[in-house]
Amino acid sequence: MVDAVMRRAQDAFFEYKKITATNRSLFLENIAGAIEHIREDAVAIAHKETNLPLARLNGELTRTTSQLKLFANLLREGSWVEASIDTKDAASPAKPDLRKMLAPMGPVIVFGASNFPFAFSTAGGDTASALAAGCSVVVKGHSAHAQTSQLIFGAMKKASDVSGMPAYTVQHVMGSGSTVGRELVEHPYAKGVGFTGSFAGGRALVEYSQRREQPIPVFAEMSSINPVVFYPDTLSKNAAALAGVYAGSITLGVGQFCTNPGILFGIRGEGFEKFLDLLGEELSKVQPQKMLHSGICASYQKGVGNMLSQQGLKVLSRSAGVVVGEAEVGLDAAAVLAVVSGEEFLRNPQLTEEVFGPYSLAVVCADRAELLQALQGLKGQLTSTIMATESDRAEYGDVIEAQHNLAGRIILNMPPTGVEVNASMVHGGPYPATTDARFTSVGTTAIKRWVRPVCLQNFTDGMLPDALKNSNPLGIMRLVNNLYTREAIQ
């Protein structure tokens, strides 16, 4: 089955990559329109499969269609291909004419994510960016929302037919990640992989890709505890407000966000102590909520239980009504806030592991030196958040600089949960947050994952892609003999 799917993907790629940017943009807009047409059914089915609230799912579906339109606009603007031209020099007859641009790699495998049934799944950012780049796509649907995935794919198939795209430009398969997923990644026609999920899942895909005769890139977003540092002056002025904000952030979506603030740092003192007491009170008021599925809930229960067994760790607060770390109670997950000293934290690397759900660990450091040491010992993250006044920023510049080295997105005075989809967003970071910190899985530059630079030497104008022609029919911005221009070459 997989071999047939990949052969069709390969054939489709050779046709699809020749489709003009204008027609690819119309295809993406037609996908968005087809999904909007089935919004009511898609949201209802996703709600049944994932336990996510209707309002959240409606918002996520809008994000999904919006990012499809965003990539359509990117294609029309055109500068993302990074066209550059160095023409012959009359003074140096031996110098060749050289023209370079980004070109699609080939068939891409996209793994749907369990926690975002729309935005990071079948028609999500990985698929949208790969199609925009000119790659064919094979979606491996997630079993946690199989019906939703099939429904969205049906809309995509209709859009493909209406848009006149090559058959099998997008395909959809189901099955185990360790069998079907492995076969897809290891197939010689696959040229790239997009994944959002667990560290174990991402690592497995990387290992599959490395076993190939020709290794391929796996762009996996895997694990992040998203450190937040609360500096003294801001705590002295804003403790109560910050407690409310972070209680909401920790429990947003039952903690099932990759940007969930999983670790909170501060320096021992009245300000941090007051903040943690208030945060604990706020979290204790939050009623347990249903998680996405039994596997995630069981993993959360196990993870919290393991953390609470660590030496020196204490529970500061938990939601009432659910026993954490013991037998699963339905799919309900209790919010848990634990606390540990900076000294114990530095001794125990297990405390830096992600617990996916509404859990956060507060680390009380003895002084700035211990805080700096703790931050420098962290692995790569998606986000690193600075909660600080101007006075804090002046006094703790070296500690803040350490935060800059940790993550792809550095945040000032806002919680990390929530990701905007635009040209400036970086949703990536050093390992193990992602497999390649040079790229993002959210925003328009996500397209760069699915392309490679190609140089054409001494080609005639009629042989060149439109972006590199002398006439520049696309009107895109190009680098011509070291000058950016939209004009035809004279």
Image (cartoon, helix red, strand yellow):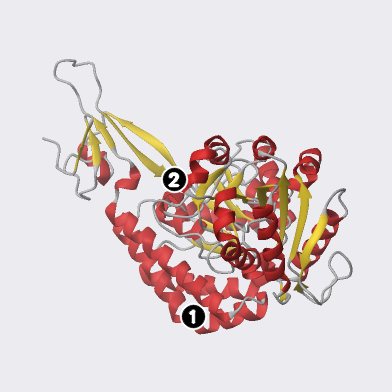
Q: Which residue is denoted by mark 2 in the rendering?
A: 448
At which x and y percent is residue 29? Answer: 37, 68
Query: Which label number is shown at residue 39?
Result: 1
Name the image quarter holding the C terminus. top left
Callout 1 crowding tier (Cα within 10 Å): few <14, some 14–19, many ≥20: some
Name the image quarter holding the N terminus. bottom right
At which x and y percent is residue 304? Answer: 80, 59
Residue drawn at (73%, 72%), measured in percent from left and top? 284
* Identity, as a three-letter code, of the amino acid under mark 1: Arg
At which x and y percent is residue 282? Answer: 67, 70
Location of residue 215 (image quadrant): top right
Q: CA distance from mark 2 to mark 1?
A: 30 Å
The foreground one among 93 and 229 is 229
For residue 376, above or below residue 178: above
Sequence-wise first label, 2 or 1 = 1
Element class at badge 2: helix
